[in-house]
Image (spheres, rainbow, N blue to C red):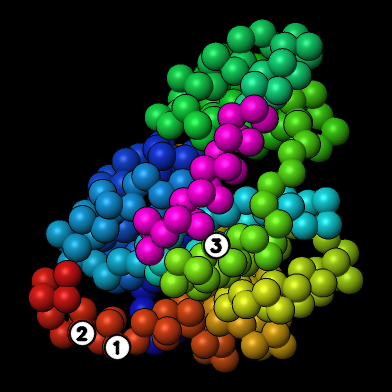
Amino acid sequence: MHLLNADLHCHSIFSDGSLSPSELAQRAHQGGVALWSLTDHDELAGQAEARAAAEALGMAYVTGVEISVTFAGETVHVLGFDFDEHHPSLVQGLTELRAGRHQRARDMGESLARAGIPGAYEGAIKYAANPELVSRTHFARFLVDNGHCSSIQEVFSRYLKEGKPGFVEHRWAGLGEAVRWVKEAGGVTAIAHPARYRFSPTEEFALFGEFQAHGGRGVEVTCGSHFPDEVVKYADMALEFDLLASRGSDFHAPGESRVPLGTLPDLPGKVTPIWSLWAPRLAAHQADPMAAA
């Protein structure tokens, strides 16, 4: 199971990616992905297209989402997998999160205007196929294309991180809420890219402990933003907290993402992959991909 090429973290035009779900499915297939999930931020609108495209290409598919959470004053992302995307609790919770995103985007535009960059909100929204999900990435693309910065990374460091002119603090879902929404919809959750959070060791331990106590099942061990030593660290933490290990590129756009879909190293052998939960389904799919679809 460790050698399965699973990519369970990427984003489409329905959140802050630049490609459609079908285009992402093609890239995943070209990268040799056997198990795929589209995990747009707080949004499920791309799931039907992603599933249909994956199945047409012979890939196994599980529903996915990346939910924005506030924990200890930091924004944390929780991945949800293999749920009923029509379940009322999940749908309602994500709808409320997107409403908060819309107001944050307007506030970011006003903040950037005060810093001497007018029209940033109107500019960013042109990059967003889903106007409910104007994100920092859309602002970054606008600022790069209009000559304010030379790269996405420069935009974040100069304007969009905490303490910078375009940063707007926002409270997202609670950790327990996010886990509960996915559980009630029949799915499982995993902490996304844990190395990215600016937690002290005590705060990180609290995050993992509270996540597990709420019924969280996994952690992203191998991902596009983890270096080899971080993979080892979070494999050990997965074992310490009895969590399953996930793997995903966090692909957003060609030229922006660190790794293409499907090209990550395998999970360390000592962890249990989160897709072991779906072993019978995956075995049936491997035996006859089109019949399983």
* Disc with the residue nearer the chain's start (2 vs 3): 3
The residue carrying mark 1 is: 280
Q: CA distance from mark 2 to mark 3?
A: 28 Å
Mark 1: amino acid: Pro
Q: Against 159, is 61 above or below?
A: below
List x then y, in percent, for residue 23: 27, 45
Q: Nearer the viewer, mark 2 or mark 3?
A: 3
Q: Which SS class for mark 1? A: helix
Give the residue displayed 59% in from the left and 67% down from the top: 180
Assess disc 1: are there few (<14), some (14-19) or many (≥20) residues with their C-alpha within 10 Å of its C-alpha: few
The residue stretch that appears in magenta: 84-104
Q: What secondary structure is marked by label 2?
A: helix
Quadrant housing the N terminus: bottom left
Residue 142 magenta-highlighted: no
The residue labelled by disc 3 is: 181
- Say if mark 2 contacts mark 1, CB within 8 Å: yes
Q: Nearer the viewer, residue 95 or 11?
A: 95
